[in-house]
Image: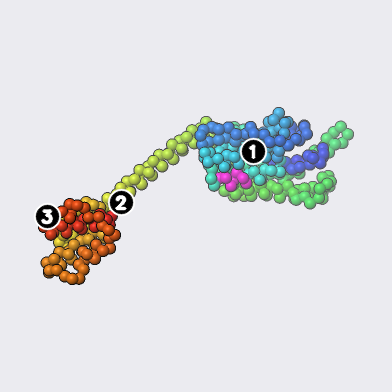
Amino acid sequence: MKMIRRTQMSNKYGIPLMIADTALKAMFNSNTEEREISTYVSQISEDTAKLKIHGPLIKYGSWWSDIFGISAYSSISKEFKKLASDPNVKNIILDIDSPGGMVNGCSELAETIYRAREDKHIISYVSGQGCSAAYYLASAASKIYAHKMATVGSIGVVACFEKSENENTKIIEIVSSKSKDKRLDVETAEGQEKIQTEVDDLADIFMEDVSRYRDISLDDIEKTNGGTFIGKQALEMKLVDEISDLETILKEFDMSQVQTQKEVAATTQVDVKAVQAEAITAERTRVATISAKAKEFGVEDFAQELIAMGTSANDAEQLMQAAKNQVNASKEGPSIMPTGFEKEMEKVDNPEVKANITEATGSEESVLKASMLAMAENIK
């Protein structure tokens, strides 16, 4: 159950908490001293990192948090953001074993985790406890795994007050309610009612966020009644997605990575074959188009040369048309008007006519063919 504890020990500790009852006292045995601690991340493989979320959760770390095994939202957030911005890290495992902790800082970190799901594969693994604020964080991942002996849940809010009477300490608890006043008399009905409203509102936020993160209904969450559940029961209550262990999860990551590489290889192979098929089809179309026009113009031999040179179908058609016009003009006798061939030649800037063409001693047809091929070469 997410717990908000307000102690009357001092104003410094009159802050809301989300934590299981058994883990509270260790948090207040020493004075708080803000400090960032970077002992949360361990690299498992090239693309997979594990982020540790262990022990009671507070907003800022200190020297005593190391001693008592307490984690700080500020440090967890700092390390998580580094992983989220690292292009080499594809998978992030939230390694959770925590009873919960302070309200302050929890929702902000959970939202950071939730938003990062767009770019990273993020899962939560609850090895021991994933309660209250810790479950808040776990629920922000894409998937939650829990060990068969793990305790999960405690979705709710409790306000606790300590009152000293002589040598006895009296603890007053109000389970799940909006506090507008700061110093309330928790022994009066009015004071309890206002605190009830506060913890209820905080519990609503908690439940709504879990519903959004986990994509489960509020009715399903409310059915937990703020209780905790062991392994298989947590699965039945839809609090986790699968019962597993860390070794199995890592193997699944490796298999998933291999499968992804196979899919990439298969996709690449398919793409190459597709390009090859497209090129073959385009070449066949080019040859067929040129051959058909060559037959129409009566210049089949010339067309074979153009095909061998790789001339496009459009350019080949223009050249074959010009050749046909030139042949027809030569049969009709000299003309003072420019021939079709001459017009085409005028479009080419300084075509290079090789020596064997000017020195050709063959027929007029062979000279014409050589000239046309020279023009085709320049068009290319």
Say whether disc 1 or disc 3 marks the residue closer to the N-terminus.
1
Say whether disc 1 or disc 2 marks the residue closer to the N-terminus.
1
Residue 168: x and y in percent read: 85, 33
Observer-nearest residue: 131 or 15? 15
| Dots 1, 2 in contact, CB < 8 A | no
Alpha-carbon distance for marks 1 and 3?
Answer: 89 Å
Number of the label disc, if any, that sits on residue 278? 2
Number of the label disc, if any, that sits on residue 202? none
- Circle 1 sits in a helix, a strand or a loop, which is it? helix
Tell me: residue 301, above or below residue 118: below
Is 112 left, or right, of 355 in this rendering?
right
Query: Which segment is the magenta one?
Result: 111-117
Q: Residues within 10 Å of mark 2 (few under 14, many from 20)?
A: few
Residue sitting at 67 percent across and 49 percent down? Answer: 205
Colour convention: rainbow
Residue 94: x and y in percent read: 59, 37
Q: Which residue lies most toward the bottom here?
A: 336
Residue sitting at 66 percent across and 45 percent down? Answer: 107
Residue holding disc 1? 76
